Structure formats: structure tokens, C-alpha cells
Amino acid sequence: MSFTRRDLVASLAFTGTLALAAVLSPAHAQAQDKKELVFGATAGPYADQIKLGIKPLLEKKGYRVKVVEFNDYIQPNFALAQGALDANAFQHIVYLTKFATENKLALSELLKVPTAPIAIYSKRHRTLDVKEGATVALPNDPTNAARALLVLQEIGWLKLREGYDPIRASEKDVAQNPKKLKLIPIEAAQLPRSLDDTDYSFVNGNFALASGLKLTEALALEKTGPTYQNLVAIRTDDKDKPWVKDIAEANRSREFLAVTDQKFAGFVKTDYQQALQAGAAK
């Protein structure tokens, strides 16, 4: 897939203006001693985590920080690989690995970030007492569809075949569907809107919160493990750069833990945040 600088300038929204073109420079992003960092994130909680928790800490160290918000899962990795971004935060390791491999991008995980779990919501029902023939919308991308199917199995709505791959599970792996549920694949960003037309819809945490849904309103939450926790991605060649270490330090700080507790209640905390909490409790 060809992704040019012109494509990026035409498609990105940065505080509602196309002035982004003036600051997104590969040479700028690669500078060793730079003091300006450009983050990419999906609009909603992951952009807010950077704005509220990470940006202030980096600015105290003398950096100027810009946040570019995306409305899809495709552009942020191309923008990062081409040097238009220094880091992005929107995806889990399964998605990053698959996307980077298929598109031959040299991208790596830096560290995990607090993650809003995928969850099932409904405007028509208040419980999980599902009726026969109910319509259930789920993400149409393979990795998130697999997550939704696992939750459906956990709540007892269907059963997957023995030996299924939990990372690649698909509708083909459904062995039993006693309620004859109608599974409707939909692009992830459109799932909040699907609630008007379905009995139940799975919604990724970032899109749920961006649309005004609350984690406390969900009928069931995924038990999100490290495999599906979102992460900060960087270019592999940058992993030892001083500014990358400063990004990691900001994420691992007690200050960011406090922001997580105050602003992102219900998010699945990272291992390093849980360690900080455990240490404070002693």
C-alpha cells in the first residue's frame, strides 16, 4: 500500500486544521537531540491519556509535544513508519505485529498503556438474558472479532470448537450457537452507532468512550490480559534514543498513575502501574 506525505496531510485532523503539514517532517522526527515530539493516537481516551498524563511530564523536561488524532486504525502506523510521528498509541501487540509484518514496517512496542476493555452494550436490554435470534454486532477486523467471540463464550451465549486459536478465532470456529444469534460484523468505529439497530453490540473501549458510553454501562467487560492491552509503538531504530526513554519514564511514573486513577477509572492498568500500587500499599 502506498502512503505518501500528501495522503497524510489530506487525511489527518490536527486540532481541526491542515497546518499539520508544517510540523510533520521525517528529518525532524529522526533528530537525535530534538525537543519536539509528535504523538499519534485514536481520538478519545488514548489521545487524552497523552494530553492529560504524558504531555505535561515531557514538557517539564523541555519537550514541545503535539498530539495528532486519527479516526481509523490504518494511518497511524504508516505515519509512524514514515517519520511523520515519533510514537503512536492505539493498538495491541497482535494488531501491531500483523500490520507491521504485512506492510513490512519496522515498528516495535515500547510499553503497554492503561486500556479500556472491549465490552458489550445494549440500548434495548438491561441484562444478558439474551433471546433467540438476537442480533449481535462485533468488530469486523480479525483480532477484535476474536476478542468478541471469546467474551460471547465466557458469558455462555455460544461455544467455540475445541482447539481454536484464541487470537485468530472467527465465526468458522463457532461450534454451538443455541440461541441462533445473528452475528453482524461492522467496522469498529461504527459500532457505537449500531446500538440503535441491534440487540447488543461489542464496542472497543476507545470508541465507546469517545461516543459517550461509559464502562460502567457495559453489560459485560472483557478480562483484558497483556495480549490485548494497548501499547506505545515506536520505530524500531529509535528504541535507544534518549527521547524514547523519556516517553517510557513518563508512562511509568507515579504522576501518570494518579492521572489514570482520576481520569480513566475502569481501565485495565499495566503491570508497572500495578507494581507501583502494590509498593504504595506496603
Image (tube, rainbow, N blue to C red):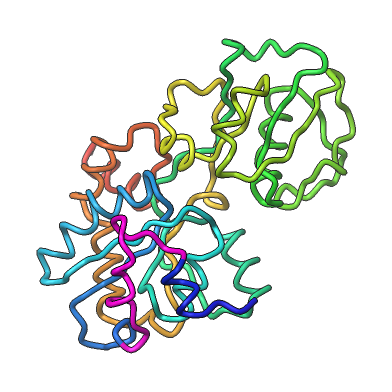
| Residue at figure coordinates x 88%, y 28% from the top left | 176
Report which quarter residue 179 is drawn in. top right
Quarter of the picture containing the N terminus is bottom right
Residue 194 image point, x, y percent: 61, 30
Q: Position of residue 79 (x, y in %)?
A: 46, 73
Location of residue 15 in the rendering, given as x and y in whole percent from the top left corner: 28, 56
Query: Is 171 displayed left or right of 104 in the figure?
Result: right
Instruction: Report the residue at 31% width, 55% height from top.
Output: 16
Residue at image position (38%, 73%) is 85
Horizontal and vertical percent position of residue 229: 50, 50
Quadrant (top left/top right/bottom left/bottom right) for the C terminus: top left
Instruction: Please tell me how many numbered marks the rendered image carries.
Output: 0
113 relative to 154, above or below: below
**Residue that appears at 56% across and 35% down:** 203
Q: Is residue 24 shown left or right of residue 268?
A: left
Q: Classify residue 125 as left or right of residue 145.
A: left
Q: In this image, 146 relative to 76: left or right?
A: right
The answer to which of 282 and 105 lies nearer the viewer is 105
Q: Is residue 236 magenta?
A: no
Magenta stretch in the rendered image: 11-27
Which picture quadrant has residue 96?
Answer: bottom right
Say if 212 sits above or below 73 in the image: above
Q: Is residue 24 above or below residue 152?
A: below
* Camera-nearest residue between 156 and 263: 263
